Image (tube, helix red, strand yellow):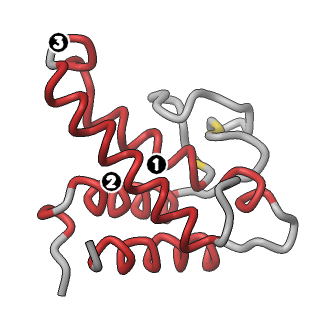
Amino acid sequence: MFQAAAHPAAAMLSEARGLLLRGWCRGAQARDDTGSGVPAWSDDARSWSLLGALLASWYHEQGEDLDRDVAAHSVDARALGDATAALGDAAGTASLEQWNDEPRRTLADVVAAIDRATEILESF
């Protein structure tokens, strides 16, 4: 079985999956406990879209070091790109926000896309 920690993009997908299981939303990258849209990385975020959860995961990985460590930032930016590409393949579209926001979309669909994206990364 593929180990998420062995691939930074898979680790991001795993963290995003956990965030989505805590709360999923449509129409914004993240929402606070009143339902208002907030930045995906906000401490006030309580639910996330697919892309918002991925961005929150990337931001949490960067933390305070966002401007300090250019080399690490480059590796994590690559991982974000890899995770986004794998999600696009899994969802069948590069427009993850539009896909997430489709009225018939369910949390189960979103989690399944993350699981498929993780499997896609296994093939790299």
Amino acid type at image mark 1: Leu
Q: Nearer the viewer, residue 86 or 46?
A: 86
Amino acid type at image mark 3: Arg
Judge whether 54 appears above or below 72 on screen.
below
Q: Nearer the viewer, residue 124 or 105?
A: 124
Point out the image quarter for the N terminus: bottom left
Judge whether 23 appears above or below 64 on screen.
below
The image quadrant of residue 74 is top left
Real-space CA distance between mark 3 and mark 2, rounded to the nearest whole angstrom: 20 Å
Q: Secondary structure at mark 3?
A: loop
Q: Is residue 20 left or right of residue 30?
A: left
Q: Residues within 10 Å of mark 1 (few under 14, many from 20)?
A: many
Q: Secondary structure at mark 2?
A: helix
Real-space CA distance between mark 1 and mark 3, rounded to the nearest whole angstrom: 22 Å
Q: Label 2 belongs to which residue?
A: 12
Judge whether 106 appears above or below 87 on screen.
below
